[in-house]
Image (cartoon, grey):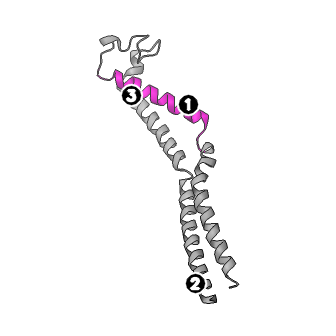
C-alpha cells in the first residue's frame, strides 16, 4: 500500500500530460512563424497568382499586362510576367510554403511525445494502483 500514492501520482501526471499536449501547440506556435514571414508568404502567393493568370495570355489580351488590370500592379512590364518570372515566383512561393508547413508542425512532435508518455503513465499508474489495492485487500 505504500506504493499506491506513487501509482496515483503517475496516473494524474499522465492525465496532466495528455491535457497539456493539446494546449502546448497554441502556447508556442507564435514563436515558430514571424509577422515578416507571414507578409513574405502573402506577397509570394499574390505574385504567383498574378503570374499564373498572365500565363497563356498575350500582354494585350483582355487587359492582361496592362497597368491597372486586376492581376497587374501599376507599372508592370512584360519582363516581369515571362516564363522565368513565373518559375521564380513559383520557387519563392514553394520556399515560403515549406517554411509555413515547417512552422505549423514544428512543435507538434513534442505534443505527440507528451501525449504518448501521458497515455503510458496513465495506464501504468491505473494498473499499478489496481494491483496494489487488490493485493492490500
Numbered mark located on residue 90 in the image: none
In the image: residue 89, left or right of residue 24? left
- Seen in the picture, residue 87 relative to 78 is either above or below; the reply is below
> Relative to 37, is 69 on the left or the right?
left
Location of residue 91 in the rendering, given as x and y in whole percent from the top left corner = 43, 35
Q: Residues within 10 Å of mark 2 (few under 14, many from 20)?
A: some
Tag 2 secondary structure: helix
Disc on the earlier residue, 1 or 3: 1
The quarter of the rendered structure image containing the N terminus is bottom right
Question: Magenta segment, principal secondary structure?
Answer: helix
* Residue ID for mark 2: 131
Does residue 2 show up magenta in the picture? no
Instruction: Give the number of the mark in front: 2 or 1.
Output: 2
Within-10-Å neighbours for mark 1: few <14, some 14–19, many 20+: few
55 drawn magenta: yes
Q: Nearer the viewer, residue 47 or 129?
A: 129
Query: Circle 1 sits on which residue?
Result: 39
Q: CA distance from mark 1 to mark 3?
A: 19 Å
State yes or no: discs 2 and 1 in contact (Cβ < 8 Å): no
Task: Determine the residue positioned at 56% across, 78% down.
Answer: 127
Q: Earlier in the sequence, mark 2 or mark 1?
A: 1
Q: What is the span of residues highlighted in magenta in the rendered image?
A: 32-56
- The residues bearing labels 3 and 2 have C-alpha atoms spaced at a distance of 67 Å
Q: Label 3 crowding class (10 Å Cα cut-off): few <14, some 14-19, many 20+?
A: many
Amino acid at each position: 500500500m505504500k506504493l499506491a500514492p506513487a501509482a496515483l501520482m503517475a496516473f494524474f501526471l499522465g492525465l496532466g500530460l495528455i491535457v497539456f499536449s493539446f494546449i502546448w501547440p497554441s502556447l508556442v506556435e507564435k514563436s515558430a512563424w514571424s509577422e515578416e514571414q507571414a507578409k513574405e508568404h502573402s506577397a509570394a502567393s499574390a505574385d504567383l497568382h498574378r503570374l499564373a493568370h498572365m500565363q497563356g495570355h498575350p500582354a494585350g489580351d483582355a487587359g492582361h499586362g496592362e497597368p491597372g488590370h486586376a492581376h497587374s500592379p501599376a507599372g508592370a512590364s512584360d519582363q516581369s510576367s515571362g516564363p522565368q518570372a513565373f518559375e521564380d515566383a513559383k520557387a519563392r512561393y514553394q520556399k515560403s510554403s515549406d517554411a509555413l508547413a515547417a512552422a505549423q508542425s514544428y512543435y507538434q512532435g513534442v505534443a505527440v511525445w507528451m501525449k504518448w508518455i501521458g497515455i503510458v503513465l496513465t495506464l501504468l499508474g491505473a494498473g499499478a494502483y489496481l494491483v496494489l489495492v487488490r493485493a492490500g485487500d
